[in-house]
Image: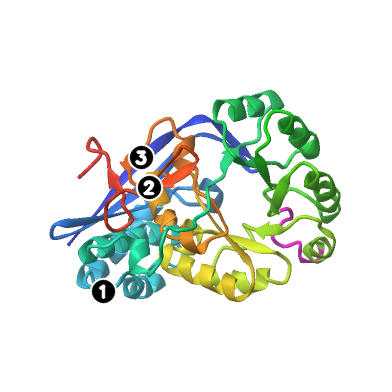
């Protein structure tokens, strides 16, 4: 068994801005797990907002490498449980390892991962395409440069409704809005009333995570569905969100990979919540892992590779308003030749 790590600084097509800040590059870590003739690939994007760097992910993985070596014949779920106590402070590192293990496991068994889970691709959602905060002119330009039937609009300014009204003049696409916790309950109630008439499907994370009283008020009065993002990080959050949200957006990097992510999807379903899985501007390696969950989802945000100037991997691809799965086992991801091991 061999565990290797590769770092990339993914260049974005456009400066990407949300209420937390802006960036032109996305640092990311690729994990490669090799056993015999098979190599599994995993990924986690480093996110400064959560204190995650490629360096601290690599350091965390070095510590568990002997444990991985000893238990490489285990299932991904078994390995996740074994490594979890050592990686609980760095779920992003655990995510990259867990995805690589799932990919390897699928390849060892000669099946795409979704088929190992007994799923089919008969009915899967299409990803939205994200428009980051910018001048209205530049946001309109991004829409015109990438015509798509479904956009996620990042908000969190003093003129959010005005922005959506202007964008609506240039496309008939469905909008989703993500306030990234920037609104008050009163703002969200008023904004929802106006956004509903602008063909907005739902509002993602309107309030701060700790504004429970605000969420109680908003949940009772919102005319649009509310989807938790920052309020739904780990498995125990799903049940908490059921009281104040209509659905949850699960991020594999935040919860620690496909193993807990799939459990969160199943728990949300049991609680009657709508289910979304989102990306963190990963390459096709990370997005190919998300794609394995598509048959279980209502919504998905897996547009990371679409936001990049150039990708580093082949795998599940999105074009012609469809999701295209490769004829490969595991997650289907493999690094392009110039990056491969």
Residue farthest to the front, as pictured: 122
Front residue (pair 280, 64):
280
Name which residue lies at 73% across and 33% down.
Answer: 168
Mark 3 vs mark 1, CA separation in Å = 29 Å
Select label 1 or label 2 by which is in front. Answer: 2
Whichever of callouts 3 and 1 sits on the residue coming sooner in the sequence is: 3
Residue 139 visible (yes or no): yes
- Which residue in the protein does label 2 denote? 316
Q: Which residues are magenta?
A: 206-213
Q: Secondary structure at mark 1?
A: loop
- Which residue in the protein does label 1 denote? 74
User: Where's residue 26, x and y in %?
Assistant: 46, 39
Mark 1 vs mark 2, CA separation in Å = 26 Å
Residue 25 visible (yes or no): no
Name which residue lies at 84% across and 63% down.
Answer: 217
Q: Residues within 10 Å of mark 2 (few under 14, many from 20)?
A: many
Q: Secondary structure at mark 2?
A: loop
Q: Residues within 10 Å of mark 3 (few under 14, many from 20)?
A: some
User: Where's residue 121, x and y in %?
Assistant: 42, 58
User: Where's residue 334, x and y in %?
Assistant: 28, 47
Q: Judge left or right: residue 85 versus residue 175.
A: left
């Amino acid at each position: 068994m061999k565990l290797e790590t590769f770092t990339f600084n993914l260049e974005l097509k456009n400066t990407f801005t949300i209420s937390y800040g802006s960036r032109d590059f996305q640092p990311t870590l690729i994990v490669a797990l090799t056993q015999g003739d098979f190599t599994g690939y995993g990924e986690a994007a480093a996110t400064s907002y959560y204190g995650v760097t490629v360096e601290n992910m690599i350091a965390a993985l070095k510590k568990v490498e002997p444990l991985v070596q000893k238990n490489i014949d285990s299932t991904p779920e078994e390995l996740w449980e074994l490594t979890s106590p050592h990686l609980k402070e760095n779920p992003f590192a655990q995510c990259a390892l867990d995805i690589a293990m799932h990919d390897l496991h699928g390849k060892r068994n000669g099946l795409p991962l979704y088929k190992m889970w007994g799923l089919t691709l008969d009915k899967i959602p299409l990803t939205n395409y994200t428009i980051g905060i910018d001048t209205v002119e530049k946001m309109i330009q991004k829409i015109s440069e990438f015509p798509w039937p479904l956009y996620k609009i990042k908000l969190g300014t003093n003129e959010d409704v005005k922005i959506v009204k202007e964008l609506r003049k240039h496309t008939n696409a469905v909008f989703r809005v993500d306030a990234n916790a920037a609104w008050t309950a009163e703002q969200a109630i008023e904004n929802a009333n106006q956004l509903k008439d602008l063909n907005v499907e739902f509002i993602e994370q309107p309030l701060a995570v700790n504004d429970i009283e605000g969420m109680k008020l908003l949940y009772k009065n919102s005319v649009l569905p509310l989807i938790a993002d920052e309020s739904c990080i780990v498995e125990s959050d799903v049940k908490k969100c059921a009281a104040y949200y209509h659905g949850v957006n699960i991020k594999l990097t935040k919860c620690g990979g496909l193993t807990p992510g799939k459990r969160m999807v199943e728990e949300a379903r049991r609680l009657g919540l709508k289910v979304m899985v989102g990306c963190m501007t990963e390459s096709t390696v990370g997005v190919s892992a998300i794609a394995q969950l598509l048959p279980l989802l209502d919504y998905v945000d897996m547009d990371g590779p679409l936001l990049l100037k150039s990708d580093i991997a082949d795998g599940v691809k999105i074009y012609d308003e469809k999701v295209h799965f490769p004829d490969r086992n595991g997650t289907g991801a493999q690094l392009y030749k110039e990056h491969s091991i």
